[in-house]
């Protein structure tokens, strides 16, 4: 078990020993304040893109539902006839190959798993680079007619000026012990939410209780809301009927009540496990670090029961299968694995006032449907 997993699990259970790290949190807070002030007064240069930028971020470490939210927003904007592009740091990719455009053929090892998922779901113009200015420049060179850019997880990237900030707050996790890193999992203090556009990520059902909620009544505006709606399970590997037909394994859709291996390499795997439990499965949980690079050997060990993964993990696993298997004749072991690998897609369902606020913000930026 690596240090990231140890710390993450300690945050989830609010382990008492975390308070020993409080001096490091104080140091983190001081450095964060100094860094932000340096950008504010111009010691460090910041970049303003030639078109408006909306940042989707959070103040906590780990998953909060940003990627499904971005996919939902891109869908909505595309339906409105607005030409929207997306940029990302490309975490998990090869930064030496960046800036890079993301396409349907891009490898998660090169551009990251979340960018691959976003592009596969939306077909949006997208680029990745830790330097967001370079990401935007690369994107606009290839797509000069874009009207709006969505920046994935750039809330703490002060080198990029933005026009709109949407901060996702996860109801299931709350804010833990309300401390900054590393004592807690806050990237910024809770006060950062005041006056912001807050997207309150609710649970689709009462899966767990969280008494640790931000007092939104004291905030400058009421939160907007979203939840993740699970879709129908899909077989991860689709078989070409002209190729070898499975002789081993049962490709029957897993039913409510059966045991399943839930394998997850996302920021907050408990949400995934809770969702499967809510759907009626008897879950055998297997959590890995966020953006984990799976191996087929690890997946092969989860035998006897169906394996269910998230869409984000499925992007990496499918690329791994393509690279490893290709046109080879499959062994019985691999046939069995492919027949029991399933994906649980989820869709972000936004409250109507999310779209109302977005339309108001777009009008203020003079962004209208393109001809």
Image (cartoon, helix red, strand yellow):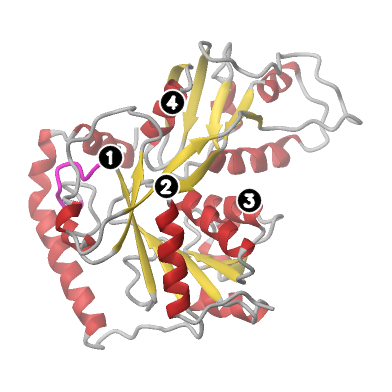
Mark 3 or mark 2: which comes first in sequence?
Answer: 2
x%, y% of residue 188? 22, 60
N-terminal label among 3 and 4 = 3
Q: Is residue 142 above or below residue 211?
A: below
The residue that label 3 is drawn on is 121
The residue stretch that appears in magenta: 174-181
- In this figure, which residue is indicated by the disc labeled 4? 286
Residue located farthest toward the right when viewing the structure as drawn = 242
As measured in the structure, the alpha-carbon distance from the residue carrying label 2 to the one carrying label 4 is 20 Å
Q: Which residue does the image show at 55% across and 50% down from the upper left?
A: 113
Sequence-first tag of 1 and 4: 1
In this view, the residue farthest toward the bottom is: 42
> Element under label 4?
strand
Q: Is residue 132 visible?
A: no
Mark 4, Cα crowd under 10 Å, few <14 / some 14-19 / many 20+, is some
CA gap, disc 1 and disc 4: 19 Å
Q: Are marks 1 and 2 in contact (CB under 8 Å)?
A: no
C-alpha gap between disc 3 and disc 4: 26 Å
Q: Are marks 3 and 4 in contact (CB under 8 Å)?
A: no
Q: Secondary structure at mark 3?
A: helix
* Residue lying at 60% horizontally and 71% vertically, measured from the top left: 82
List the residue tagged with mark 2.
Answer: 65
Identify whether 309 is placed above or below 86: above
Residue 173 - label = 1
């Amino acid at each position: 078990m690596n240090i990231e997993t140890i710390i993450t699990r300690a945050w989830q259970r609010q382990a008492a020993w975390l308070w020993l790290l409080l001096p490091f949190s104080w140091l983190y807070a001081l450095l964060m304040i100094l860094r932000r002030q340096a950008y504010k007064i111009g010691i460090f240069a910041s970049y303003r893109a030639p078109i408006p930028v909306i940042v989707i971020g959070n103040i906590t470490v780990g998953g909060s539902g940003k990627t499904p939210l971005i996919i939902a927003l891109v869908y909505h904007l595309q339906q409105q006839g607005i030409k929207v592009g997306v940029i990302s740091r490309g975490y998990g990719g090869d930064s030496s190959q960046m800036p890079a455009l993301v396409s349907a053929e891009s490898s998660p090892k090169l551009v990251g798993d979340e960018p691959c998922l976003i592009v596969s779901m939306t077909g949006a113009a997208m680029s990745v680079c830790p330097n967001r200015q370079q990401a935007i420049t690369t994107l606009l060179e290839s797509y000069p007619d874009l009207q709006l850019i969505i920046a994935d997880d750039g809330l703490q990237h002060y080198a990029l000026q933005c026009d709109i900030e949407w901060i996702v707050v996860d109801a299931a996790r709350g804010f833990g012990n309300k401390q900054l890193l590393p004592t807690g999992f806050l990237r910024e203090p809770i006060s950062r939410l005041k006056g912001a556009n807050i997207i309150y990520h609710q649970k689709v059902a009462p899966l767990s209780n969280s008494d640790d909620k931000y007092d939104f009544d004291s905030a400058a505006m009421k939160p907007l809301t979203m939840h993740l709606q699970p879709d129908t399970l899909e077989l991860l590997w689709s078989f070409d009927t002209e190729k070898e037909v499975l002789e081993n394994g049962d490709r029957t859709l897993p039913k409510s009540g059966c045991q399943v291996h839930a394998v997850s390499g996302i920021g907050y795997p408990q949400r995934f496990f809770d969702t499967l439990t809510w759907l009626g499965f008897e879950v055998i949980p297997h959590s890995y670090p966020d953006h984990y690079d799976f191996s087929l050997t690890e997946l092969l060990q989860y035998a006897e029961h169906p394996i269910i993964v998230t869409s984000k993990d499925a992007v990496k696993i499918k690329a791994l299968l393509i690279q490893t298997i290709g046109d080879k004749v499959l062994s019985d072991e691999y046939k069995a694995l492919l027949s029991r690998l399933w994906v649980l897609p989820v869709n972000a369902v936004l409250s109507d006032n999310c779209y109302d606020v977005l339309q108001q913000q777009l009008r203020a930026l003079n962004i209208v449907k393109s001809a």
